[in-house]
Amino acid sequence: MNQDEVLAEFREAEALLEGHFILSSGKRSPMYLQCARVMMQTARAMRVCAALADKVRAKHGEDAFDLCVSPAMGGVVVGYELARQLGLPSVFCERVEGSFVFRRGFDIAQGARCLMIEDVVTTGLSSRECIASIEAHGGTVIAGASLVDRSGGEADIGVPLTSLLSLTIPLYDENKLPPELMAIPAIKPGSRGLKA
């Protein structure tokens, strides 16, 4: 699946939004990618995750990982379907009082080779936090994967990142908005609140 085909999947799912968006980092953006809409149709979810699994296998080989780990909330469905495509178990961590933890009986075997999976990588902060939690629980993070890299390859998550779609989308501080964004009301479409 090439970039244009992936973008077509997002457009068809009405998941590529344009306007003035407040991201979970607090940054502002003229574009928002709602991966949950892409994943809500099981056939589309299977197509895009199969394409991402092919890219992960091409980059890391067939037996590079023991476990797929995703941060909740956005990465859970992507992580599950990508793990299914790779034939691996899938677990997720979730934020409790601002930090990622493993609950629901999930654990990580000491030294397990992990693939950290996100829906969207913007600055890489939540990916790095998830990776730190995996490593604190005994896993070894070999690589990361995401449906979308909004940074155009600039985000550093500390391990190699494979993304199905890579875009360079500008980010702005609230007090440094371009005039075209200042003229549009800001909306916050994400699943979690702004960081303090």
Image (cartoon, rainbow, N blue to C red):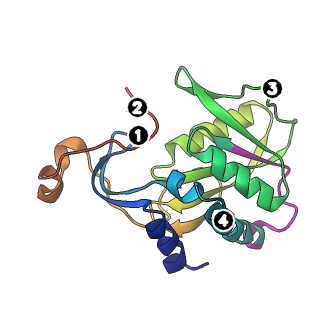
Q: Residues within 10 Å of mark 3 (few under 14, many from 20)?
A: few
Q: Residues within 10 Å of mark 2 (few under 14, many from 20)?
A: few
Q: Quadrant of residue 55?
A: bottom right
* Disc 2: which residue: 193
Image point 38% across, 44% down: which residue? 189
Q: Which residue is nearer to you in this view: 58 or 119?
A: 119
Question: Where does residue 105 sit, x and y in percent of width and height?
Answer: 80, 26
Q: Amino acid at mark 2?
A: Gly
Asked if residue 64 is among those painted magenta in the image, a careful observer would answer: yes
Q: Residues within 10 Å of mark 1 (few under 14, many from 20)?
A: some
* Disc 3: which residue: 105
Q: Residues within 10 Å of mark 4 (few under 14, many from 20)?
A: few
Between the C-alphas of marks 4 and 1, the distance is 28 Å
Image point 51% across, 55% down: which residue? 37
Precedes in sequence: disc 3 or disc 2: 3
* Left or right of 59 on screen, residue 15: left
Q: Amino acid at mark 3?
A: Gly
Extent of the magenta region:
58-69
Asked if residue 161 is among those painted magenta in the image, a careful observer would answer: no
